[in-house]
């Protein structure tokens, strides 16, 4: 059909009906997409504007039963087009009553909605690629991809190569972050439950989200708390429920609000010490930053006899420095029965709460689920007509600037299946001006599987950035400021100015989002690894493995450096493990060249960023259940299949090479994840949690 349909362009569009083979639900979505697309083309190609009566007759046909129904549909469609970046102008006839719909006309200016041409140097493209890839697996990743696609259609992508050792990225901050970004840009309040740091109590909050930013290694929401009647700061790690967006309500944030400036004045919590008992010979990482501690009289839980730091001699009492009880509590909960908190009581409560939540979740009934419709390797997401139209608006200028690409290459570029792309193309070739004759339809052909476009009907230039797209790129550029390789006054500064000018009003709203610092803590190790990558030299390291709780010596062939926030890693071929491994720079005890050249032919897979967890076919396939709060873990650990549950949670299948640490993983996340299969692993995690809780039983 793809080869034949374009030949029938002499017939009106209505002769084809709805293109493609669609289900009833998909057909309704396709009809809405086609209507919006035809409305857009009609308004773009009208010099003087079209009256409502003309639009109703030529675009809406018999789809509306009354004037009132048509009016409501037309207003919704105008709002939708505005969301895509097209402002519908209202044109009045001079001398007539402006309230008279018969004399009111509508059009879309051909220039006002366009992304200005942005000409970038190769150095600026390099910086921009780094900024866009910051969000690869985090919220705004799709927005960054869309923005880059628009820029490529606008000015052309230079042939650039990313430098070794400068591949930072922003760590996904969970489903709450994504929901808050969406609510912030749509200007809807949100509701969530929150563990207050001042009182230690869990409370429900209703907040107008003004901005999101990273400070002290944590993500904060800044907004107007309707319960307290004032501006407040909320740390995302203290959210105890999923975020509910109040879509029927709206707010307006203060003019020129800048979340980075707001968070700059937020004081860091004071450093204090916790007293914990640790099993002898265990938890080497915790011991590295601790000191032996005397008993703190009067503060020990009843389960620990004051003055006796493990009377059986199996324990060491340590003083652990920390700033936030919730963060340390999350870490200590993961250690299960290998640690018990002596003081303060606030920390002991934080650990017990996580363990109790994990135990309760593990004991809950197993829900019914079905992987039948799950797409492998991707978290399922319902595709909407808005998604499809947004993709089409990027697809047309992309095809104009990339004539003759193979249809599968185009599908891969847009992250859809070939069938989905063909459905898009079938709608596009049946869309055009109201008359629908040869010169008034989009002309796209894909004979022999190569796609060509010869008639674009004013859709050949990319539309201006959305707020999400502007935020993704501009926040990414701001985040790169922390890298020593990208000093101010260089390409980073010039490309930021160009993007700000191109983004316009949407760019001004990027101040509502601020990324984390990505500069490395240990620049000496980073420089040594980068030098070894460039010279092709092996490295010898002594490495602390948190999963096995042990030190090991390894000879490695370093391949590339990258980061998650300010935690830096390097990917290398490990001669001990005989395979690719990822090493955290802050867990390296010793690092030096061993005087040998790299000897392994293994290279990175070419994907970016490098996966922290690289599944293999012989790894253990683990089935886990995730609550709505923990749903983002499916993406973090590269789930092969997922099934959506009625409450918004997920069941996911994930491959793990080493499963011995998974009980720690379940305990750490405190009731947001549990293991369903294999049964032995699920039982091991329950035993781990029960043994940890037993230490606080009395």
Image: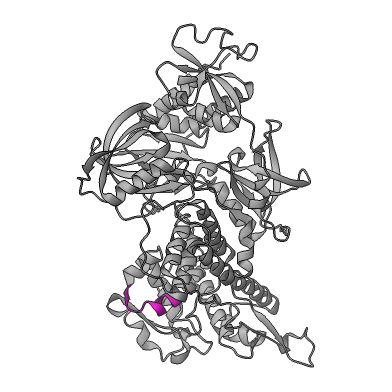
Looking at the rendering, the stretch of residues picked out in magenta corresponds to 397-406
Q: Residue at x 77, y 46 (%)?
A: 230
Q: Residue at x 40, y 53 (%)?
A: 373
Q: How many marks?
A: 0
Position of residue 522 relative to residue 165, above or below, is: above
Q: Quadrant of residue 510?
A: bottom right
Going by the image, does 278 lie left or right of 607?
A: right
Quadrant location, the N terminus: bottom left
Q: Compared with residue 349, is residue 264 higher up or lower down, i.e. above or below?
A: below
Between 251 and 293, the one lying in front of the other is 293
Where does residue 165 sit, x and y in percent of width and height? 38, 51
Q: Does the rendering let one see residue 561?
A: yes
Residue 636: quadrant of the picture: top left
Which colour assignment does the render follow?
A: one colour
Whole-percent x, y for residue 297 in the image: 63, 11
Asked whether residue 402 is drawn in magenta, I would say: yes
Q: Between 451 and 676, which is closer to the camera in this rendering?
A: 451
Side of 693 where 658 appears, left or right? left
Q: In the rendered image of this protein, does residue 604 appear above or below residue 334?
A: below
| Front in this rendered view, residue 693 or 223 | 223
Does 88 appear above or below 161? Answer: below
Residue 395 drawn at (x, y percent): 44, 73
Q: Quadrant of the C terminus?
A: top right
Residue 166 in magenta? no
**Coordinates of residue 314 in the picture (x, y in percent):** 44, 11
Residue 19 visible from this viewpoint: no
């Amino acid at each position: 059909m793809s080869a034949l349909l374009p030949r029938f362009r002499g017939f009106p569009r209505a002769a084809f009906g709805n293109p493609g083979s669609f289900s009833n639900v998909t057909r309704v979505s396709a009809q809405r997409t086609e209507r919006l697309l035809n409305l857009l083309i009609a308004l773009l190609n009208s010099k003087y504007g079209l009256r409502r009566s003309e639009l109703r007759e030529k675009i809406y046909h018999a789809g509306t039963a009354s004037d009132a129904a048509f009016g409501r549909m037309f207003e919704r469609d105008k709002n939708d087009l505005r969301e895509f970046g097209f402002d519908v102008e209202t044109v009045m006839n001079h001398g007539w009553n402006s309230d008279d719909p018969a004399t009111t006309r509508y059009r879309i200016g051909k220039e006002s909605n366009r992304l200005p041409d942005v000409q970038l140097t190769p150095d600026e493209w390099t910086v921009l690629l780094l900024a866009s890839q910051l969000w690869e697996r985090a919220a705004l990743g799709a927005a960054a991809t869309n923005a880059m696609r628009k820029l490529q259609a606008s000015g052309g992508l230079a042939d650039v190569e990313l430098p070794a050792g400068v591949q930072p990225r922003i760590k996904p901050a969970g489903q709450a972050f994504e929901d808050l970004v969406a609510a912030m840009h749509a200007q809807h309040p949100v509701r969530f439950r929150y563990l207050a740091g001042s009182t230690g109590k869990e409370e429900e909050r209703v907040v107008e989200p003004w901005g999101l930013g990273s400070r002290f290694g944590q993500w904060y929401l800044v907004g107007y708390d309707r319960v307290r009647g004032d501006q407040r700061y909320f740390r995302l790690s203290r959210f105890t429920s999923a975020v509910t967006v109040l879509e029927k309500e709206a707010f307006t944030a203060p003019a020129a609000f800048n979340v980075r400036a707001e968070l700059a004045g937020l004081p860091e919590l004071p450093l204090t010490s916790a007293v914990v008992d640790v099993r002898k010979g265990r938890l080497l990482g915790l011991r590295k930053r601790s000191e032996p501690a005397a008993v703190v009289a009067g503060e020990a839980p009843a389960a620990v006899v004051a003055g006796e730091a493990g009377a059986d001699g199996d324990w060491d009492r340590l003083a652990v420095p920390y700033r936030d009880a919730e963060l340390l509590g999350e870490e200590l909960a993961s250690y299960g029965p290998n640690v018990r908190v002596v003081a303060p009581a606030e920390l002991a409560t934080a650990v017990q709460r996580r363990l109790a939540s994990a135990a309760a979740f593990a004991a809950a009934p197993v829900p019914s689920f079905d992987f039948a419709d799950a797409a492998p390797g991707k978290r399922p997401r319902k595709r909407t007509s808005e998604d499809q139209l947004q993709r089409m608006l990027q697809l047309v200028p992309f095809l104009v600037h990339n004539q003759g690409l193979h249809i599968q290459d185009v599908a891969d570029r847009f992250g859809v299946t070939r069938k989905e792309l063909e459905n898009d193309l079938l709608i596009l070739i049946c869309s055009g001006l109201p008359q629908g004759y040869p010169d008034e339809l989009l002309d796209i052909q894909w004979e022999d599987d190569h796609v060509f476009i010869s008639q674009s009907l004013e859709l050949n230039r990319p539309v201006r950035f959305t707020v999400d797209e502007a935020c993704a790129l501009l926040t990414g550029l701001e985040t790169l400021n922390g890298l020593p390789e990208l000093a101010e006054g260089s390409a980073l500064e010039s490309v930021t100015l160009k993007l700000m000018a191109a983004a316009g009003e949407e760019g001004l709203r990027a101040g509502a989002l601020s990324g984390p610092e990505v500069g490395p803590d240990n620049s000496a190790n980073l420089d040594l690894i980068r030098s070894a990558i460039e010279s092709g030299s092996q490295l010898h390291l002594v490495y602390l493995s948190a999963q096995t709780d042990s030190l090991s010596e390894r000879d490695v062939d370093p391949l590339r450096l990258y980061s998650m926030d300010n935690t830096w890693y390097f990917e290398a071929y490990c001669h001990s493990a005989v395979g690719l491994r990822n090493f955290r720079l802050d867990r390296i005890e010793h690092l030096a060249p061993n005087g040998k050249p790299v000897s392994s032919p293994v290279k990175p897979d070419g994907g970016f960023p490098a996966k922290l967890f690289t599944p293999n076919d012989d790894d253990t396939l683990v089935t886990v259940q995730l609550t709505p709060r923990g749903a983002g873990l499916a993406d973090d650990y590269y789930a092969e299949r997922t099934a959506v549950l009625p409450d918004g949670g997920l069941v996911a299948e994930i491959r793990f090479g080493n499963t011995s640490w998974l009980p720690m993983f379940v305990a750490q996340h405190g009731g947001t994840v549990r293991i369903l299969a294999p049964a032995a692993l699920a039982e091991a995690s329950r035993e781990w949690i029960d043994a940890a809780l037993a230490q606080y039983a009395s």
